[in-house]
Image (cartoon, helix red, strand yellow):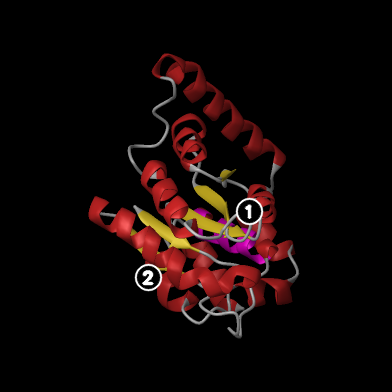
Amino acid sequence: MKIALINENSQAAKNPLVESCLKKVVEPMGHTVYNYGMYTAEDACQLTYVKAGLLTAILINAKAADFVVTGCGTGEGAMLACNVFPNVLCGHIEDVEDAFMFAQINDGNAAAFPFAKKFGWGGELTLTYAFEKLFSQEFGGGYPPERAEPEQRNKKILDGVKAITTKDMMTILREIDQDFLRETISGEKFAELFYPNCQVPEIADYLKAL
């Protein structure tokens, strides 16, 4: 699995810590982490939580990532921003129970964490344990097991509803403020990480043309 990490500006200083916790958990499982920043609070590319949502949507819709780990101070803004876009289903994860049940019941492809709220001593432990439960087994298995069939059915219904209620990604890329889009993809390592992994040439070509 290709797992992308995105930190917005208010919590950019925690990027090395989050990356370390994430890699420690998922790399032994055979997954690869792609860190899209922000790397420090002083980065030239300043990602707000809205830009984090747009970047998440670009990565998921271009199939450059299978899953995105993101967040903000509370996790709420990043979760809301992600969920306005097509084909992105982002959960708000505060603890291990959230992590496990979101993966098994909702079968999403992005998770927003609160990197400031209640993030004191042991914050990195809570984050590590949540990553362990989030990626502990294949997504969408259902929980509890006897609820698996209706949960899987509801997930398909939700995907179908979202396909109707959201525009396609290329329409969004063309209609969104182009300066805002340029700023979103101006990260130090965006081109290096994104284009080799992008599987949708139309998206890659459009972004390169910017």
Cα–Cα span, label 1 and label 2? 29 Å
Q: Is 146 in the magenta? A: no
**Residue sitting at 63 percent across and 53 percent down?**
75
Q: Viewer-proximal residue, 98 or 186?
A: 98
Q: Is residue 54 magenta?
A: yes
Residue 64 seen: no
Q: Quadrant of the C terminus?
A: bottom right
Amino acid type, residue under disc 2 in the picture: Pro
* Residue 159 x %, y %: 57, 34
In the image, residue 68 sits, relative to residue 165, either above or below, namely: below
Q: Nearer the viewer, mark 1 or mark 2?
A: 1
Q: Main secondary structure of the magenta part?
A: helix
User: Residue drawn at (68%, 57%), measured in percent from left and top?
Assistant: 171
66 on left or right of 98: left
The residue that label 2 is drawn on is 196
Say which residue label 1 marks.
75
Residue 16 versus residue 121: which sits nearer the camera? Answer: 121
85 lies above or below 179: above
Residue range in magenta is 51-60
